[in-house]
Amino acid sequence: MKHNINEILKSSQQLSRRTLLVAGFQIGIIAALGARMRFLQVKEAEKYRLLAEENRINVRLLPPARGIMFDREGRAIAENVPNYRVIMVREDTSDVEAVLSKLQQLIFIEPKDLEKARKELGQRSAFVPVTITQNITWEDFAKVAANSPALPGILTEVGLSRTYPQKENLAHVIGYVGPVSDYYLDRTKDPDPLLQIPRFQVGKTGVEAQMEQSLRGSAGHQRIEVNAVGRVMRELERTEGEQGATIKLTINSKIQNFVLARMDGLSASAVVIDCESGDLLAVGSSPSFDPNLFVRGISTDDYSGLRNDIFGPLRAKAVQGTYAPASTFKMMTALAALEDGVLSAEDTFFCPGHFEVSNNRFHCWKRRGHGTMNVADSIIQSCDVFFYEVGQKVGIDKISAMARRFGLGEHHNLPLSAVSRGVAPTREWKKKSFGKSWLLGDTVNASIGQGYVLASPLQLAVMAARLGTGRALQPRLIQSINDEQMPLGAGAPLDVDPEHLAIVQKAMFGVSNSKVGTAFSKRIISQDLRMSGKTGTAQVRRITAEERATGVIRNEDLPWEKRDHALFVDYAPHDNPKVAVAVVVEHGGGGSSVAAPIARDITLFALTGKMPDLDHYPAGVRKKIRSDQKNLAPKLIDWNSVSTSGQSKT
Amino acid sequence: MSYLEYNLASVPVGFRKILALNWPIIFLLTAISGVGFVMLYSVSGGVIERWSQPQMQRFFIGMIGLLVVAMVPIWFWRNMSFLAYSIAVLFLVAVEFVGVAGMGAQRWLDLGFIRLQPSEIMKIGLVLVLAAYYDWLPLERTSRPLWVLFPIILILIPVFLVLRQPDLGTALLLIMGGGAIMFLAGVHWAYFATVIGSSFGVIVVVFQSRDTAWQLLKNYQYTRIDTFLDPDRDPLGAGYHITQAKIALGSGGWTGRGFMQGTQSQLNFLPEKHTDFIFTTLSEEFGFIGSISLLGLYTLVVVFCITSAFGNKDRFSALLTLGIGITFFLFFAVNIAMVTGLAPVVGVPLPLVSYGGSAMLIILLGFGLMQSAHVHRPRPKQK
């Protein structure tokens, strides 16, 4: 192109002008960028430094070891054992399947666990450890650990898991732990961050649940540096948590074990109380279950098996179950009448075998009647008609008031699940609960512990202990928490005339030790161990007039669920009570024939601390007792297998 | 003015050309690239082979390319301008059909021995063709509509192709770079006022088209604009880049957290920390002092380009030098604006520092052209 010199000059000038404009614009932009950097890096530096730290540092909770539990003699009830696990980190291996099949050659892995692990391995990030199998034996664990060089990506880990070494023995008392549920998390006001840990174990029932706050301990924490995808780069700081409290129960697991073994095969429950301290030595419900199943995650089959068992192994019958106390309630009626003055020790009534009130006929268990009876006779022989008469005279409100002094219809505050209050009925109570007026017939029924009266075996045991000692004994389940002793439940003297109490005590002695007593054949003959007791047979069905006419059907001829409940309460030794016992056998039949022998054996075991000597039994039954004891012995726990406090099991 | 009418006797020949190079620019480019090597070493966690070493090799190759291009007389490059532009357009068309997807967009052209980013070539190609055009065009025609329309078409062809990839960042850089050269060449003010005015109109239309059948941008581009306007809207999703980048920048403070001590980059909180977001690592580890120093180096490059252009009486050479400078400026300004949260995240690398072969080679070759213009600039006749 030809350009003249003017054009060149013109072009050059114009270019320079525009260049300056553009350069100015550029400098403006650069200045803005510089200002922005200064703003972010100098003025806002603090804020962003903080955000960077928040990005980088994660606080992780370290779950504390759960508090352990012992019985009164230091035998382990609930402890934490090492849980040997095999875990896998996917990114550390090139061929997951090859490593897994090598691992399977080494140890047995449940196909179910393996499938679950495979699925998780596929879903989680490559660096997240996935549990392949857990709760493996130490031998398997050692095998895997020894072969780790050949198993890239496989790691062994030891955690803690809850275990109940006594298995079925204390299931209903201590309950069990399980992973905290979403439902619970939604409801609870408990702000403990530990609960937010996935599958964190909390007490679900029993002492585990009720003493959760003490047992849980407090969380430790760990400050860790993480990268953007959450991989842990290093640990910056670590504070260990505090283990939960060590709890010592008042339970004597040997007695508990005997109680359960003695009731084996029955749907029954029994409570043993120490009469000096109120300590619960045994709280047994039969059949029981193994709480360890729940900790590991119970299978559907196992669970429905427990659920569908008509004997209700999951129910803590001893404290949750309520039964008509039947004749064991007669002492209450007697004491109420003696206190009211409508009855004196010498007053007699004639028992013809039945009793008429407002056109209803109430029957005595003895069809032909007991004849002339005073209060002691009627307790010893368990005459119903006597108490129909007396109960009617004294009235329900006074009977129930007396019952409440002995703990019936009262709530015993124990760290157990669903402790029943039972019922000591009053007129007002019936009006409120049913909207109906109290009838005379109700009093007649209640006076022999039937009808509206309901009590749990625990309450019956407390009643027996209070009758035996004359003190308002309080049951106690926790002996100490971290060696700090809990208050004793010895209780103050009861507000009952000692003379009246003596009449009843003497009668209860007669039940077991007088020839006409309903439990005479189940007596203890050793002078210093003799017991006082009372039988009870709770009717669970209505006996019609027609049936009475043809003869009441015997228990053995009835379907199980229609048979009578068998009850027995006692305390021993009769003159200086050490233990009180209540036994309820659901649909067991007669209190004398079924419940009394169980209570006698339990009483003897509790007093002597070992399998009762045959010398304590009347000569006539020793042969049978010997064979019974032989059958029972294998059901007892080998205590060498259970660790005791101060000694740790490896 | 062209060399056809100029006395060439004073232009250095042979190896004397090396002495005539604009050495300050070469030093600056080396220094900036050096910063890049250091930062790439840091973000790789101390693994030099990962990014730092390949980058050095490319810089070395690029530097040789720069010198070779600089030795060749500028009039040769002027004659090649249209050809270079045409080849770049062809590549852009080719990438439509055989492009390799990277980061969700079709941008690469795999030639077997090298993976090429045709949009990078176009940045230089466009500067070349526009400079040649305005050198050829008689001055009085510069602002005539027909002669204005032609360079606009030259700009819009590659813009259209790049937008289809889709690469909004490069498209905007091409428009801004091309527009700047037209402005420098003396096109009348009114045209620019019209274009800027109508761009606002377009922006309005683009946003109006959202969620309709004729939606003009991809959804990811809309969300990027959304999160630019309000990064807190989606801190773990779309706004994550900007949020983390700002945290990294801000936490650097005055002096930074120290080499390889930046938690944001070392712990991978920063996205694309070795490419588009590498500036944040520099800021985090070397603080305000480090980042403002790098900005200073960049500014000096632009300043030296302008000085060189002022001293060059050849219209093509001056326009080319300014065009290269502006392209370079747009690169780093948009990138820094982007990572400091002043502009949307559009995917523009930090020139010479971000990891990437094409960009480094193209930038160095571009400066090779600028050096050629500098070496072969017309000098006053020696008596």
Image (cartoon, helix red, strand yellow):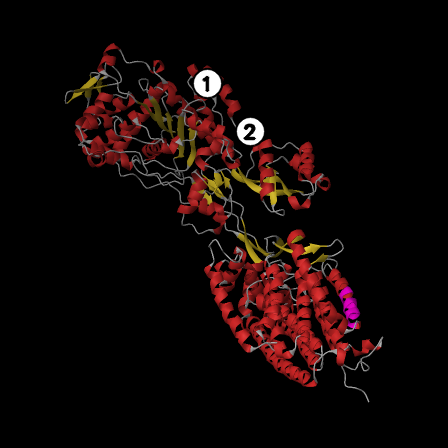
Residue B245: mark: none
Q: Decide which of tag 2 and tag 1 comes sooner along the chain.
A: 1
Q: Badge 2 local density, few (<14 within 10 Å), some, or many (20+)?
A: few
Q: Mark 2 falls on what kind of element?
A: loop
Looking at the picture, how far across and down is residue B137, in whole percent? 66, 75
Q: Quadrant of residue B93?
A: bottom right
User: Most prominent secondary structure in the magenta stretch?
Assistant: helix
Asked if residue A102 is positioned above or below residue A353 in the image, the reply reads below
Is B67 part of what is drawn in magenta?
yes
Magenta part of the protein: which range? B61-70
Q: Quadrant of the N terminus of chain B?
A: bottom right
Task: Same chain for labels 2 and 1? Say yes or no.
Answer: yes
- Marks 2 and 1 sit apart, C-alpha to C-alpha, by 22 Å
Looking at the picture, how far across and down is residue A211, in whole percent? 44, 44
The nearer-to-camera label among 2 and 1 is 2
Is B258 part of what is drawn in magenta?
no
Looking at the picture, how far across and down is residue A191, in whole percent? 44, 52
Residue B138 can be seen, yes or no: yes
Looking at the picture, how far across and down is residue B375, in whole percent? 77, 77
Q: Residue at x 61, y 45 (%)?
A: A129
**Left/right of residue B325 with respect to residue A220 in the rendered view:** right
> Which residue, as the protein is rendered here, is positioned at the far bottom?
B383
Quick one: B269 or B237, which is closer to the camera?
B237
Residue identified by numbered label 1: A625
**Left/right of residue B241 with respect to residue A550 in the rendered view:** right
> Which residue, as the protein is rendered here, is positioned at the far left?
A358
Residue identified by numbered label 2: A638
Residue A519 can be seen, yes or no: no
Q: Quadrant of the C terminus of chain B?
A: bottom right
